[in-house]
Amino acid sequence: MKIPIDGVQAFVHVAELGSFHRAAEHLFITQTALTRRIQRLEAFVGLRLLDRTTRSTTLSPMGKEFLPMARRIIDDLVDGLDRLRTSSRLGVGDVTVATLQSVAFRHLPSALRTYARAHPDNRVQVLERSGALVTEAVLQGHADFGIHIQQDPHPDLTEDMLMRDPFVLVCSRSHPVAKAKGVAWSDLKGIDLITLGGASGNRRSVEAQLAKAGLNTRGRFVVESTPSAIALARENVGAAILPAAMTKTLAAGLVEVPLVEPVVFRLIALVKRKNETLSPAASALYAVIRNELSHARTKTPAGRA
């Protein structure tokens, strides 16, 4: 069913101006084109809306009843189009981004500050998730886009590489390896390790490397959050394997020792649904994050922090 919106617009103008001639001039069309629009509308509704003679144009009884509704239709359409144009031009709107907790804590505040200055009327909701839960939030449409650990290609997603963080060993300053310039993965044997389990996106990379080194893929202590891992390391009950980006805000008494032979990275990427256009507001935030976080890539560790 093709609704003749141009006919509704023409009807309103004729009704308000009382003349086909003046209405046609106002719409910048010929009277013939205007007449055709009215005729298509009347054919669509199956009623005569305008009574026209050589001397006057008046509303039929049904035309009088329809006029208030027609005005609302046109007003709502104009208002809606104006809002879309404003949104497109200024990037106005709400945005929801899902992100790793580590990125939310360390990298995202600066990007959000930049975005807020450029878009002071926009509202941003940040969903802090671990690992695969960021990806799931994007797939299910709970977030416009996300910041997650880069994964194998997904048919419904597209990724944009941001940065890479090497894994390090976080331990107390009194730990036996605290003064080492680096620790090989194979030398972790005999160390009480603290690893992340649950939905952590780092889990697969860490467990794979531990397996290659001939070690148990699960540490002696397995926790589900980085703060818990750091708390255990602070109490010197073990050493935690964490991304370097997580350790920049470590409390006093903890150090990070580079894990080498090999250096293993977690890759951080922006992720969004494939073949879906971001809203202007979301697109603007995506661009800010890509610009700021891509400049914050962590270098390969060369020594102790």
Image: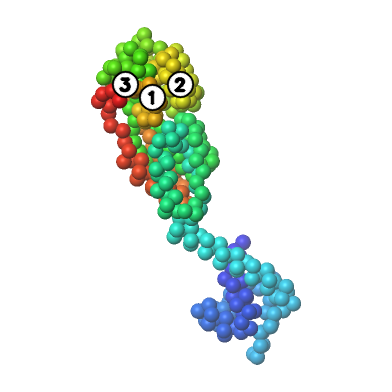
Mark linked to residue 257? 3
Q: As drawn, which residue projects farthest toward the right? A: 61
Circles 1 and 2 in contact, beta carbons < 8 Å = no
Q: 82 left or right of 168?
A: right
Relative to 247, residue 278 above or below? below
Question: x, y percentage for residue 222?
Answer: 47, 17
Query: In percent of the image, x 48 and y 30: which residue is there?
Result: 130
Mark linked to residue 231? 2
Q: Tell me which corner region of the image, top left, top right, bottom left or bottom right, holds residue 194.
A: top left
Question: x, y percentage for residue 68?
Answer: 68, 71
Q: CA distance from mark 1 to mark 3?
A: 15 Å
Relative to 36, residue 290 above or below? above
Q: Tell me which corner region of the image, top left, top right, bottom left or bottom right, holds residue 170.
A: top left
Question: x, y percentage for residue 85?
Answer: 48, 62
Circles 1 and 3 in contact, beta carbons < 8 Å = no
Can residue 208 be seen here?
Answer: no
Nearest to viewer (mark 3 / mark 2): 2
Q: Nearer the viewer, residue 8 or 79?
A: 79
Earlier-in-chain disc, 1 versus 2: 2
Q: Residues within 10 Å of mark 1 (few under 14, many from 20)?
A: few
Can residue 239 be seen here?
Answer: yes
Q: What's the amino acid at mark 3?
A: Val
Q: What's the amino acid at mark 1?
A: Ala
> Could you tell me which secondary element the residue under label 3 belongs to?
strand
Q: What's the amino acid at mark 2?
A: Ala
- The residue at which mark 1 appears reads as 252
